[in-house]
Image: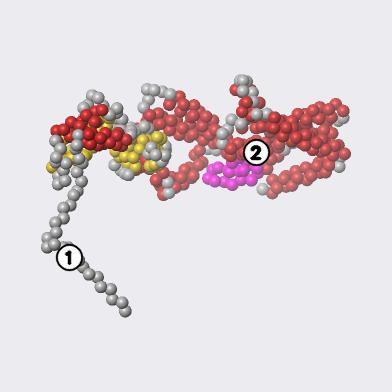
Amino acid sequence: MDMGLNDLLESIKMAASSVGAEITSPWFYLQFGIILAAAGFAYAADTAIHARVEMSSLAIRWPLPLRHFARVMVKSASTAVFAVLMVVSRIVMWHMTWPSRSYLIAVSAKLALAWLVIRLVTSVIDNAFIVKLVSIAAWLVAALSIIGQIDWAADTLDSVGILVGGLRLTPLLLIKACALLIVALWLTNIASNFAESRINRATDLTPSIQVLLVKIIRIGLMVVAIAIALDAVGINLSALAVFTGAAGVGIGLGLQKIVANFISGLILLVDKSVKPGDLVTIGESQGKISAMKTRYISVAAGDGREFLIPNEDLVTQKVTNWTYTDKNTLVKIAFAANYDADPRLVCKLATDTAAAHERATKGKPPSCVLTEFAEFGMKFSLTFWIADPDGMDRVKSDVMLALWDGFKGNGIKVPYPVRELRVRGGALPVESVVEVSS
């Protein structure tokens, strides 16, 4: 530890003396002025370019790689112009005087070019936070490499560490591990998205099998990517046994619901009891399954709402799946008619009305039966089949409205409770309320 600190102090002293010698030279101020002037010109050029170039129509007829390159360059116009000016200034001063007198300009040109390359590489990443993190980290590494301090920085970060089991953790090791993990997970995401698109286009796979395969591929690729990244930086996976044990305890105590939902999701995908597109009723929630996630399923109610139901509830609670084996759905409508009506005519009107609906299944004729002679009228039950349960309430409403019109056209009335009150003795008893004021 003492040796590393002494080396660090010695390096700082040497760097300070070198910077002091550089600052005392008149060429330093010339280079600094050129850099400031180039930065101001680059800022003005960036404003002019963005005011005159329409990004949506830029290079619209070019091939995709060239169009992408052109748009990145326009977005980073200030950096591109600054880099060009620095390269030109370096070439001019290289031929006019000693190369060492344009060292600062050369460093500025390399840093600007490095930033352009980084912006071009990170432009394919969608996550804004990852883009900023990768850009800053890559530019710092490039800057240290350009000024020749990358080895010193690596040695300094590696000089401090702690022992965890048989593993020595240092800042350098953690930085390398994080960088490789980000790259590995990014490549894993690209590969899994490609596999998902191919699987979703396979018409011979059911929706539940497609979701299951996508989840297995994502998890498998993620595990492989993490293992490769850790092995690449020299971390032996057996040395992480203590962390694995701690994770197991954490799962057992605080993450049991998450694990239960994850396992329940795999069970649902394997047994195919529900799948995307099914119309289900779970408790008071009814709708069509729009997505099956690792922790929950999304049920679209059809009115803009979506119910997010944990997978564990589908395994442990009663679930009504209207399309489990057959999408054909029996629609039941209960109604009543007064005793003045002919029950046979009522049944015929009901069956004809249901059969006339456009969604009624033609191969299965409707049926209407008299179920009860009730106190206020005759009760009937109309049943008919439709090919899909989606919009069943609308179908019931249409048939009932048409049945109402048929009843009115044939003089059939729908009964309702009527109370007949007979008064004996000529008058109702009236209670008098006397208010006493104090």
Judge by depth and name the residue closer to the eye, 340 or 384: 340
Residue 176 makes an appearance in the image: no
286 left or right of 342 in image? right
> Could you tell me which residue is drawn at 62 percent across and 40 percent down?
172
Residue 221 percent location from the top left of the image: 48, 31
Disc 2 marks a residue whose amino acid type is Ile
21 left or right of 385 in image? right
The magenta stretch is 157-177
> Could you tell me which residue is drawn at 42 percent across and 39 percent down?
304
Judge by depth and name the residue closer to the eye, 23 or 7: 23
Q: Residues within 10 Å of mark 1 (few under 14, many from 20)?
A: few
Residue 416 percent location from the top left of the image: 20, 46
Quadrant of residue 213 within the rendered picture: top left
- The residue under label 2 is 136
221 left or right of 309 in image? right
Residue 57 makes an appearance in the image: yes
The way the protein has been coloured in the rendering is secondary structure
Residue 52 percent location from the top left of the image: 70, 30
Residue 53 percent location from the top left of the image: 68, 29
Q: Tag 1, which secondary structure? A: loop
Asked if the stretch drawn in magenta spans residue 158, the answer is yes
| Count of marks overlaid on the render | 2
Numbered circle sitting on residue 429: 1
> Could you tell me which residue is drawn at 37 percent across and 39 percent down?
301
Residue 77, relative to residue 438: is it above or below? above
> Could you tell me which residue is drawn at 86 percent across and 42 percent down?
24
Q: Tag 2, which secondary structure? A: helix
Asked if the stretch drawn in magenta spans residue 393, the answer is no
